[in-house]
Every structure is written in structure tokens, then in C-alpha cells.
Image (spheres, coloured by chain):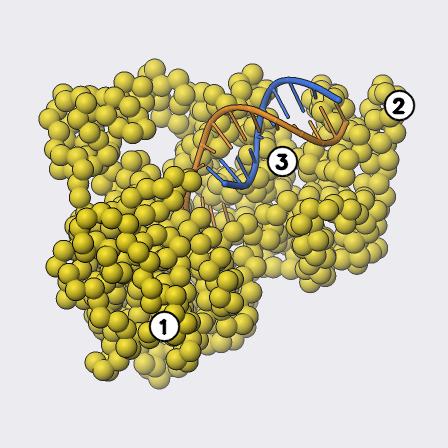
Chain colours: A yellow, B orange, C blue
Amino acid sequence: MSDPFALDDDAPPPSPAAAAGPLAVPDDAPWLAGLNPEQHQAVTILDGPLLVLSGAGTGKTRVLTARLAHLLASRRAQPWQCLAVTFTNRAAREMRERVAALVGPAANDLWLGTFHSICLRILRRHAEAVGLTHDFTILDADDQLRLLKRVIEEEGLDVKSCPPQAVMAQIQRWKDQALAPDKLPAGRPGDAAQARSARLYRLYQERLRGLNACDFGDLLLHVLTLFLGDEGVLRYWQGRFRYLLVDEYQDTNVAQYLWLRLLAQTHHNICCVGDDDQSIYSWRGAEIGNILRFEQDFPGAKLVRLERNYRSTPPILAAAAGLIAHNEGRLGKTLRPGRAHDPATVEKVRSRAVWDGEAEARMVVEEIEALHRRGDRLSGMAILVRVGFQTREFEERLIATGVPYRVIGGPRFYERAEIRDALAYLRLVVAPSDSLAFERIVNLPKRGLGNAALGEIAAFARAQGLPLLEAARRLVASGEMKPRPRKALGEFVADIDRWRALLGSLAPEDLADTILDESGYVAMWKADKAPDAAGRVENLAELTAAIAEYESIPSFLEHVALVMENDAKAEGDRVVVMTLHGAKGLEFDSVFLPGWEEEVFPHVRALEEGGNKGLEEERRLAYVGLTRARRRVLISFAANRRIYNQWRTQLPSRFLAEIPDDEIEREAAPGLFAGGGGEPAPRDPSWERPERPRWSDRPQRAEPAAASWPKPVRRGAAFAVGARVRHDRFGLGTVLAVEGHTVHVAFDEAGPRTLIDSYLTAA
DNA sequence: TACTCAGGCTTTTTT
DNA sequence: AGCCTGAGTA
């Protein structure tokens, strides 16, 4: 791991145990202790394909780590013959640590990492086979977009009619499906936009290759290309990995699926762990079909269901089960309590209607304070929102009340502009051919090298087939530039060269300091009077401090590319605020689920774009939210909400009605949803009082609330084929087909769409 | 070259 | 309502 370019040692070590064949693992091995029968199976069935369906809170991580420990102890394979893939660095790190705690240093030799990091490791060895050199660079999202934007401009298209974001999304979807530019299926005839995207995709890939770079999707795609194009290489890796372990299998996309299937072809020992009910990433290419099809894809597959939940109380499990039962096409799995719960302390799920978003934040934070006063840890409480902007109101309220909190999400450390700029300096010093880095910083801080000068350099670079830095050097030497930019550019090139000469001799963090200082970059921010400038200077200091952990700047950059750490420092007792997506895999004593309103959750766009599939994914998201809770869930929804600065009257989410009445206590603030008059209800005056009721002695719920609970109203009705309909966004259209509440409509302007009938009105 | 103003967009997010 | 991008001007 320390030297990214070092090849691992493939030679089997002189291990007598390995030569002697599998070893019987004693039944009292520490990792087997305390496993329930299903978990025990999931850990000990080592041979052949195995699908472990692990519901929320059923001890998945424990099973994964125990399985790896068991595998290593059995000596069926050496550590480097075992491949374990995860989606996040966090999951990979946690798994490695826990395996190491069980079996010691052997854990370090496992091929354990994210899909991307494993692919990178493989690709480094075979880069030439896909037209790259071994030291290719990896572009992050920002670089990708800049590059694509340039391609679009060079094609003479303008970014308004051809938004780079949209094209990039399409390209990524193709990559998710393992479609290289030459493999794209012929688009529907007449789909000009699709054809244009395909052309841009091809050009983009050519540009990447020209830069000796690839993006995240390419890591997978190139390895697939490599495997399919070179049988020898494929055989090698197939033979090498005797045991495969895959976490979060329900989140794999087509490319990852094909990759796994190829690798499993020799030994067939593939164990996939996942939960179809927690598949919430279809929008970024995840194929829930992969997990649903597992038994067909891998003949002879065994299936183990982990259904004993050790996390949540019975009402929470029952509420979640009642909700998710509304989805079709599940593998089927029922969570049941894996341990006893004291009925005296078990609380039902609660839902609460409030007047608006502000009242919601107030109510939630007061509940939090009450729990805290009672002695609960703040770090055991989470506010899980559907969309990022919902965090704002909670944040404001938490600040106002002085409750310590942490918002997870937001721009991450390595995505901040100042950090990316600093990294561009380092990249250019390390790799003079990194033209994207050159472009980013050549005029930062301002050196008087604007678009005119840059255009000149770029034209020369293109004509000569040179990287920008080299082109700049020659332009300066040839004297073809105007004196002012020539001088500035000459100094810039000389600086870069000078810093490069220091690469071997100066400690990495000192060199980074030198560069940021001498370039004037830090000074630029110090002189900036913007309120966030000081924070940026601090971030830069933090960056150089982080570099000190690495032996060289190149090895630091290699890690940054793939391991964009979420700098979530977990210290302190704080309430956490984050999106539902971000919460997957976490658990809390008390979970607050605000914003359960139609069009917020389920989100309009999910329904518009995904139809019934979209709705089911939203429902899974709700399921994920509920199952994060150990002891308490409080769902809330507002009668009124300001969305994009427009006040809207909200309807409660249909998901609320889908939770069985026995499991939930529905409350409304007085006057809300109870009077039926639609008059704005006065704020609940009790919210203004300093002392708030506790969970244990909460107020009587508003009397008529339960009886007159508003069910979600379907504003649309079933439409006849051929009927003319209107949609808020897409305008007028004609109904093509109707399946239940899903309607296929040919819109006059927006073309064919599939949506839910409630968003349509008769025209 | 650099700064200011107007217009469009706005789910979820990892690598 | 912002926020970012692009175009236009000093």
C-alpha cells in the first residue's frame, strides 16, 4: 500500500499449512462464538456461490468479518487470494480493522477495498493494455466536468443547449452499464440528443487517453475491457482470487456485476451480502435486479437469510415491515426481534403534524433537548432528511438553542476549491503533463494570464501535441508572446521547475508549504476579506499537515484520488443531521424523520422520472430510515412548507398511511388536520414554554386527530388511453397506456414520459 | 484582463 | 431565495 507502483508478491510463500490443505477450524474459534444458526451458516459455508440476505440490523458486518477470519483460519487460501469488495472506504477500513482484530496481520494481505481501489490496483499493472501508462492520473468529478465542457465547446456546441452536467450523467450511466463508446447500442433513430451525447462520449474518452487519465467509471470499465480482450490476463486474475466476498450487493451496477461474474468463473466461490429492501441507489446505476437474479446467475447458489434483528424494538420493526410490504418484487424477508425487549420501555413509533418547517425544527429540537435532559446521549440521536436543503432549518434551530450538532454531507474536504487548487499545484509539480492542473492554477492567483494568453498556449499545445506546461515553456522561449504575459508565464514555468527539483530533497509537507507560499496562493486568501477566507487558509494548513503522514507527494496524491475521506470527525457528543442516503449502515437510539410529505418524500422527481419503480425506491428509503432506530422514531410532517421560496400546502406522505395503525401513534398540533376548516392553526403555545414534555409524559394527542387522519389524496383519476392530459412541467400530452396509477404519456413538447396519475389533470 | 450584472436552475452521492 | 454560470463592460 505504501508504494502504489510496487507489484505485490504473487509467489506463494513457503507456508507448510497451505500446502497441507484446508485446516479444520475449531468450533470454539472466537469469531464463531455467539453467532445465531443463520449467521453461523453465512460464516462457514465457504465453498460455492452464496447469497446472504441480511436485513437491517441483523449483524451483517459481524458476519462479513467473521467469514473472512474463518476463511483465513481454514487455510483454504492465502490472504492475497481472497478478494473482498465494498462500496465505501469507510466500510473497507472497518472490515480490515475488525478482521485484523480476529486474525492479526494476515488481514493486511487481503485484497480488501472498494471496487474502485481494487480495479486501480489491477489496472496499474496492465495500464498499457488499455492505452495508458502505469502512472496515469485519475480525474475527480470536477476535472471530469471541466474536460467534458471543453470537448463540448470545441465541438461548437454551447453549454446552454447542451448542458455538460446532463451529458456527463449520461456518460456515467453508460459506464455503469459497461458500455464503452464503441459498444453503445444504436440509439433510437431520430434521437438526436442521444447521438450527440454518444459522439461527445467518444471524444471525451479520446481526450482522457490523451491526458493519460481516466475517470472513476473508467477504472471499472478499463478492467473489464482488459479482461475481455486478453484471455491470459483474465485467467490469471480468475485463478488468483479463490474466494470473493461482496458487500452491499444490491448496490452493484452492471459493470460491477460483470466484473464479479468474470472473476468468479474459475473457483465459483463468491459470497454476496446484501438486502434488496435497502437498494436506494438506482439513480446512480445500481441494479436491484443483480441481487434478485443471483440464484439464476450463479447455479447451485445457496441462500441464507438473516432475519433476526438485534437493533430495533418490535414496534419499529413492525412499522418498517408494514411499510415495505407495499413493495412488489422483493426476495421476501421478515425482520423479527432477535432479543427480548422490556415492554415497559418500548415506545411506539410516533408521527406528528406541525404547522410549517420552522415549527417542525422547533418541535424536533425540543424533543432532543428533553431526551438529553433525561440523560440520553446526543450522539445517539439523528435527524434524517430526504434532501440536503432540509438541514438548514434544523441547523438554525440547533444553533439558536445551543445544542451541539454535526451536519454530514455538504462539500467534503477534498472537494473544496482551495484544496483542489492546492492539489493542482502539487499535481503539476509531480506530473508536468497534467494539463488540467495547469489550466486550473496558471492564473491563480492572478498573474495577468487570462483567456487570451491561455488560448494561445492551448492552440500551440494542440498544434504541437504537447502538454500545456511544455507548450508554455516553448512559447516563452520562442518570444512569440506579448512581453507582459510572457514574463508572467516565464516566472510561472520557472517556479514549477524549481519546485520539482525539490521533490526528492524536501519533506513532502515542507515542499507543499513552500509551493503554496511562494506561489502566492496562501497570500491570496489571506488578503481576501470574504468571511470564509480565513477558514480556507486553515484548510490549507490542514492539508499540508495531512501530507506529513505520507512519505512523498506522489504517494499522497495517489491516496487523495481514491480515498476522498469524508472528514467526519466523530468526536464529541453531538446530534447528527444528514440525508437518509447518508445514514445507510448507521444506527441511533432515537431517529427523527422530518418532511414526510407528498412531493418531498416521496420526492416528486423520483416519481416523475421513475414511476412506480421510483416510488418503490423512495419506500425503501423510508424503510432504511425507520430501521436506523434502536428505540425511538419520531416522524413529522408540515402542513405548509416553503420550497424554492414558494409557500405550498402539503399533504402527508402516503408512507404514513402505509404504516400499520397498531404500530404508530399519530399526533397533530392542536388545530392541525383536525378542525378541517383549513384555517391557519395558531402555533402550539406549549412550544414556547421552557419546559417541554418528555417522551415518557408526552401530551395527550389532539383528540380528533387519529379519527380524521388525512389519507393522501390522489388528485388525479384514472385516465383513458387517448385522453388529453396536462402536467405542471411537461405541459399537454396524450395518454398512451395506463397500468394502475402509472401512466405513459406522449407530451407534445417533452416527448414520451412515464409518470404517476396524481401528477396529471385532464385537459 | 477583471469585474459586475442578469438569467436559469434547484434529489439522493461514492469513488 | 440563493448560487453558479456566462455574457457584457470598464
Q: Are marks 1 and 3 on the same chain?
A: yes
On screen, residue A757 above or below A269 = above
Per the image, the residue denoted by label 2 is A483
Pointers 1 and 2 in contact (C-beta within 8 Å): no
Measure the alpha-carbon separation of dots 2 and 3.
33 Å
Per the image, the residue denoted by label 3 is A212
The quadrant where residue A610 appears: top left
- Say which label, 1 or 3, has the lower sequence index: 3
Residue A162 location in percent, x, y? 48, 23
Question: Which label belongs to residue A692?
Answer: 1
Question: Can residue A661 be seen in the rendering of this structure?
Answer: yes
Q: Residue at x 12, y 24 (%)?
A: A721
In the rendered image, which quarter contains the N terminus of chain A?
Answer: bottom right
Pointers 1 and 3 in contact (C-beta within 8 Å): no
Label 1 sits on what residue type? Arg
Q: Residue at x 41, y 21 (%)?
A: A193
- Say which label, 2 or 3, has the lower sequence index: 3
Name the one closer to the observer, A607 or A23: A607
Label 2 sits on what residue type? Pro
- Say which label, 1 or 2, has the lower sequence index: 2
